[in-house]
Amino acid sequence: MTHRSIKECTGIIKSRLGERSIVLVGLMGAGKTTIGRRLARRLDIPFADADREIEKAAGKTVQEIFDEDGEEFFRSGERRVIARLLDNGPQVLATGGGAWMSGETRAKVAEKGISVWLRADLDILMERVSRRPGRPLLQNPDPRAVMEKLMNERYPVYEQADVTVESRNAPHQTIVSDIIRALAAWLEENQ
């Protein structure tokens, strides 16, 4: 794709997205919610956060679900909530870090959305997650080791996403523009 303006890229996305959702995947701290809200605003489509929707449905926080019901219970609800949300496209949908590990969820996203992996390196992720407590999987004496383990397990699966954008220490709008350019290029190549 030749170098297009953001306005041209936005036009390509709007004309080719149809009823599909733009589904953001990646580890905690990658910026799925923060970047997702701004991307939705830029594209003038709704934003949904799967974790918030799970909390609404359960009447509990993600942490409480993990503590009281366990991770498997949470993952089961997560699959159902994401499947339901995908019927609401077009939208930007931020998913939890583990959601993409479900083959069922990946298949539903492939059917009804375009997946975007917000990839970030370990130091950036650790710096970001340290600012926000309450991450169930990091309630551990060595959160950095946990994060490295998650990266080793999940990055090969995240690589299956349609589009990969580097989430780095740059202004949010820069990352949003990167996603818009990558999505427009993907849509031109795959339509």
Image: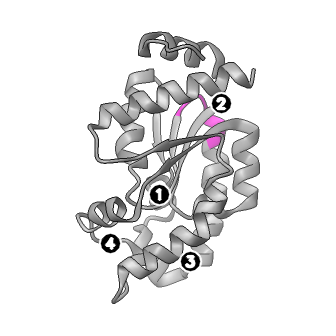
Q: Residue at x 33, y 89 (%)?
A: 141
Q: Earlier in the sequence, mark 3 or mark 1?
A: 1
The correct choice, above or below, for 151 with respect to 5 in the image is below
**Is mark 2 in CB contact (under 8 Å) with mark 3?**
no
**On the image, numbered disc 2 is attached to which residue?**
20
Q: Earlier in the sequence, mark 2 or mark 3?
A: 2
**Is mark 3 in CB contact (under 8 Å) with mark 1?**
no
**On the image, numbered disc 4 is attached to which residue?**
134
Q: Amino acid at mark 3?
A: Glu
Q: Amino acid at mark 4?
A: Gly
Q: Earlier in the sequence, mark 2 or mark 4?
A: 2
Q: Residue at x 39, y 65 (%)?
A: 122
Q: Is residue 129 left or right of residue 9?
A: left
On the image, the x and y values in percent for residue 116 come to 56, 42
How many angstroms separate mark 2 from mark 3 (CA)?
28 Å
- Determine crowd level at label 2: few under 14, some 14-19, many 20+ residues with C-alpha closer than 10 A: many
Q: Amino acid at mark 2?
A: Arg
Highlighted range, magenta:
86-91
Furthest toward the bottom, the residue is 141
The correct choice, above or below, for 31 with respect to 171 in the image is below
Q: Amino acid at mark 1?
A: Asp
How many angstroms separate mark 3 from mark 1 (CA)?
13 Å
- For the residues carrying marks 2 and 1, which lies nearer the camera in this image? 2
Q: Earlier in the sequence, mark 2 or mark 1?
A: 2
- Residue 71's tag is 3
**Is mark 2 in CB contact (under 8 Å) with mark 4?**
no
| Badge 2 element | loop
Give the quadrant of the N terminus.
top right
**Is mark 2 in CB contact (under 8 Å) with mark 1?**
no
